[in-house]
Image (cartoon, rainbow, N blue to C red):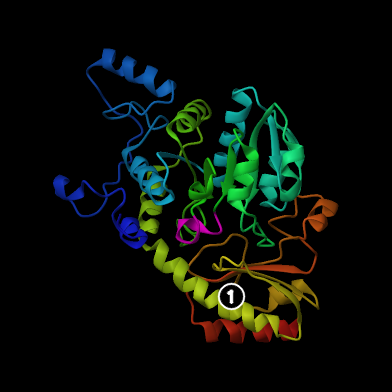
Amino acid sequence: MTALRTRAVHAGREDLTDLGVHAVPLDLSTTYPSRDSADEARRIDEFAAGAVAPGMPVYGRIGNPTVERFEKALAELEGFEQAVAFASGMAAVSACLLSAVAQGKPHVVAARPVYGCSDHLLGSGLLGTEVTWTAPEDLATALRPDTGLVFVETPANPTLREVDIAALAEICGDVPLLVDNTFATPVLQRPGRHGARIVLHSATKFLGGHGDVMGGVVACDAEEAGRLRQIRFATGGVLHPLAGYLLLRGLSTLPLRVTAASATAAVLAERLASHTAVRSVHYPRLGGPLVAFEVDGDPHALIGAVRLVTPAVSLGSVDTLIQHPASISHRIVDAADRHGAGVTDRLIRMSVGLEDVEDLWYDLDQALKAC
């Protein structure tokens, strides 16, 4: 098997030489003409059932050749049969929940912390689900006959808490374990190797990598992919072809970007741990480009004082982003639940980019002094 760096460059592009092109074709069509309406009817039946019908799609909401290249590439990098792309990470989360409900198993077990909007959706019941929040070590006691999904993030947003995927998968048994792998990416971790049956990404983050594309994607087996395509066909949460094009391009540099940013993040985490204005630092054993830390002073002053680092929500871009989770990404979560999950009012989350480490440290140090 070729190395991940090689597969990241070539996945989804294997046929380009035979097509006589070097860049991936970008198909922006919303509809696909055909003089054979009987054949169109056959394909519509297959699409509605969640199948991948050969030939051109009928309509852009059903499928798109450029998006399918990205789906194929991501499935290959995560080690799954198939992947299904959506308009956003939350559209992907919604489809996974609807899939469980459609199978008559609306109960979800989840471990905090997770991304704030995922937390809100899980607890809202808007999609017909019921959630039981539990610590990973108490997972077995939370499972029920109608449990259709176990939902975890590792490393978790924003505390970077890690869980043992293989141990959780064993406890889950026949219940699908969904791992949000947005923070680690397949560069650092492939949850499917450890028993996770569904792997989800907010593709907006590291997969795109440049802060200019929004999307979500789920890697899974063919059966689950069929259900997710049915849901996407019915609800319309499709990924735009230009987004699929940009995400496929982003995958080609993903290993290089994640490796470089992770090396810088490790240095910054070590320096932050000895800074007089920092109470504690959270950095995963797995490594990675994310660092979380708690400040002694006013976190809002820190956010306002950075000049090189970008004060903004989101993560995974080529530039370093910093935010106060209690004010932005996790604001929608009840304060008591936030605090119980370790998301304190002094916690800062930083997504390290590709700048020089000394330039980043200079900016952080001066901002911490202001804090």
Examine the rendered structure and indicate whether residue 153 appears above or below residue 367: above
Decide which of 181, 313 is in the foreground and name it. 181
The image position of residue 146, as x and y in percent, is: 69, 26
The answer, for residue 217, to whether it is visible in the render is: yes
Q: Quarter of the image holding residue 358?
A: bottom right
Examine the rendered structure and indicate whether residue 216 appears above or below residue 39: below
Q: Quadrant of the C terminus?
A: bottom right
The answer, for residue 307, to whether it is visible in the render is: no
Residue ID at (70%, 26%): 145
**Which residues lie in the magenta part?**
182-189
Q: Quadrant of the N terminus?
A: bottom left
The image position of residue 368, as x and y in percent, is: 71, 82
Please name the residue that numbered disc 1 is placed on.
309
Tell me the SS state at disc 1: loop
In the picture, measured across the screen, residue 209 lies left or right of residue 26, that is right
**Residue 43 is one of the magenta-drawn residues:** no
